[in-house]
Image (cartoon, rainbow, N blue to C red):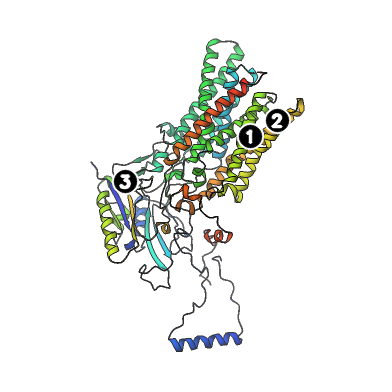
Amino acid sequence: MSIGPKPPRQSRLPDAASEARLLELRREAEQRGMVTSAGAKPAGAPFPQASPEAGYYGMPLLKKPGWSWEVPVYFFVGGAAGAAAVIGAMANWTGADKRLVRDARWVASLGGPISTGLLISDLGRPARFLNMLRVFKVQSPMSVGAWTLSAFASASAASAFAEAVDRRFGGLMPVRVLGNAAEALAASTGVVMSSYTGVLIGATVIPVWNENVRTLPLHFAASGVGSAVSVLELMGHDDSTALNTLGIGAAAYEAYEGLHIETHPTAANEPLRAGVSGWVTRSGGVLSGPVPLLLRLAALSTRGETARNFRRAAAMSTLVGSFITRVAWIMAGHASSKDYRLPLERGGAKQRQELPPRSRQQEKELLPRERPDKPHGISK
Amino acid sequence: MSPVTAFLTDSTICIGCKACEVACKEWNGIKADGLEFSGFSYDNTGAVGHSTWRHVKFVEQGPVIGLGGNALEFPAWGFSSDVCKHCEVAGCLEACPTGSIVRTEFGGVYIQPDVCNGCAYCVVACPFGVVERNQSDGRAFKCTFCYDRQKVGLTPACATACPTESIKFGEISELRETAQARVEALHERGVEDARIYDPRDSSVGGTHSIFILRGDPRTYNLPPQPRVPGEYMSAGWTSAAIAAGAMLAGALIAFLGDSRR
C-alpha cells in the first residue's frame, strides 16, 4: 500500500447491496445510538506506527557512510601498493631478479601518491588534508592510516628514486644503503597499508563491518597481495615462481573468506549475501578466490607459454575481483546502515546470530515507505 | 572548575511544539531541511542530522493505556525531543583523526568547525546515528551542546525555549537525581512504563543527554545497548597484526623457496 494521489472517483449506481448496507447502518444507529464501523479507509491506511520491533517507523537508526567512490578505489590501490613494497623488499633481500625488485618498487611508489590523491579528494574539505597530521591518535584507525600513508608514500618514493639513481650512476654505496633503508620502511608501512583498511571499516558501528572485524584485515591484506602479484605478473614477471606461490596463498585465503561469508548467514551478514551488494560481493569473491586459485594451480602443472597464459588470466581475474571486493564491502556497509533492526537488538553481536530470518512479507512491511512525489490528501 | 552539564529530556511532558528545533536552528544559524511529507505522524524531519541538531519524534504506537489520553481503540501518541547524546565514551571523538572533535570543559562533545576536514569517519563511529557530513559544505555537523552559550553562562537554546521544561539543563549528577525522582513519581501515579534512558552499562558509558521515556527505547529508535567502535579495536588490530606477519613471512618463504631467484 502506498501513499499517493487519490484515484479518480468512479460514479456508482445504487444496487441491492448498497441499499441494504445503508439500511443496516440506519438500524445500527437507531438501536445502539452509534455506529462502530470504520467507514472509508483513508489513503495510506493503516497508518505507520512505531514499536519496539519496527523501531521508529522503520527509519534507519544509523547514518549511512558519507564516503564517495574514492574510498573503495583507495582501498584497492593502497592495498596493492603496500603489498608491492613488501614483495619488492623480500625479493631484494633474498637476492631475486633485479628487474622484479625495481618494478615492485615502482608499483609501490606510484600507489603512494595515487592513494594520497584519492584520500584527499574524498575529504569534504580537501584543502585541510594536512589537519590529518595535526595529531596522532592510536585509537583512531583513520589517524593511524593517514600517518601510515604519509610514511609509506615518502619511503616508497625514496626507494624508487634511489633505484633510479643507482641504475643511472651505478653502484653508489650511500644511495644503495639509503634505498634499502627506505625500502625497509616502505615494506613495514606497506603491511599496515594493506591491512589497516580492514580495521578502518571493521571498528565502526556499521553492523556488517564490525561483525567481520576479525577477518576483514586478513581479507583485505590477501586481496592486496593478490593484486600486487597480479600487477607485477602483467608487467612481465609471469615466470616468477615466488609470485605464483604468493598468488596461490592470497587466492586460497580469498576462497576461504568467501566460504566463511557463505557459511555464516548471520543477520548482520545479510548485505553480503542478499540483494545487489550480495551479488557484487559474490562476484568479487569468485573472481579473486576460486578462479585465480584454479588457474594458478593449472599454471603449476603446465610449462612455457601455457603456464604464462594461465597466470595472466589469473592476474586479470584477481585484479578485477579485488577491485569489486572493495566496492562490495562499501556497498554492503551502505545497505547495513539502512537496516534499523540490528542496532536495536539487545546485547549486540552475540544475540544477533539468533535472529530468525525475515520473510519477504516482513521485509516489505518493515521497509520505510517511499516518499510520494506529491502530497496526498490535497485534491483540486 | 566548570560544572559538568547535561540535558534531561522528559518525554512525558513534551507537547511536540518543536520550539526546541526552531530555537536550535535560529541560534545556530542552520539551514532549513526542506518541505517533504513523510507520512510518519507529524514528523517530516525524520532524524537528527547535519542540519537538525534537535529533533522532535512523534511516536505513534499501538494503544497504550493512559498514553496520549486517547480512547483504547486509537493509537497512542507521544513526543520526544532527540539530540546528540554527548556520550561519556564518544565514538566520534575517538575516531576523529584531526582532533577536531573535543570534549569541552562542560563534558559535551564538540566539533571544531575550523579544524574538521570532512573525512566523515565520525559518521560511521556514532552508535546513535547523530553525526552527519553536510555534502555541500563538506564538514561534519552535530549539536554543539550550545558550547558558545555555555561559555558565557547561558542555558542551551533548546532548553531555554522549551515551554514545558521537558528539556531540562543543569549539572549532570543533579539531573540524574531529578530523573530518578521524576520516574519514581510517575510510577507512583500509575505510569509504570516510565523509564530513564542513560546507557551507563554499555560501552558508551552513559550520556550527557538523559531521556525519560515511556516503554521500550527501541520505539524511539534508541539502541538498548549502544556499542562504540572502541569495542572492536583490539580484535581488528590483532587481525591486522596477523595479516602483517603473514604477508612478511609469506613473501619471505615464497622467495626463499623460489629456486630460480
Residue B175 position, x and y percent, is: 27, 53
Report the front residue among A376 and A299.
Answer: A299
* Distance from the alpha carbon under mark 2 to that under mark 1: 12 Å
Decide if residue A102 is in sight here: no
Question: In the image, what residue type sits under mark 3?
Answer: Tyr
Q: Residue at x 29, y 63 (%)?
A: B187
Q: Chain of mark 1?
A: A
**Farthest residue, direction left:** B1
B243 with respect to A245 (left or right): left
Q: Residue at x 53, y 86 (%)?
A: A22
Report the front residue among B116 and A163.
Answer: A163
* Distance from the alpha carbon under mark 3 to that under mark 2: 61 Å
Q: Residue at x 52, y 33 (%)?
A: A195
Decide if residue A194 is in sight here: yes
Q: Mark 1 sits on what residue?
A: A251
Q: Mark 3 sits on what residue?
A: B147
Label 1: state its secondary structure. Answer: helix
Q: Mark 3 Cα within 10 Å, few/some/many (few <14, many 20+)?
A: some
Of tags 1 and 3, the one toward the viewer is: 1
The disc at residue A13 is: none
Residue A24 position, x and y percent, is: 52, 87
Residue A152 position, x and y percent, is: 51, 26
Question: In the image, what residue type sits under mark 1?
Answer: Ala
Q: Mark 2 Cα within 10 Å, few/some/many (few <14, many 20+)?
A: many
Label 3: state its secondary structure. Answer: helix
Quick check: marks 3 and 2 in contact, CB under 8 Å? no
Report the front residue among B231 and B6.
Answer: B231
- Let me know if marks 1 and 3 both belong to one chain: no
* Distance from the alpha carbon under mark 1 to that under mark 3: 52 Å
Is A291 located above or below residue B61 in the figure? above
Q: Mark 2 sits on what residue?
A: A311
User: Where the N terminus of chain A falls, by quadrant?
Assistant: bottom right
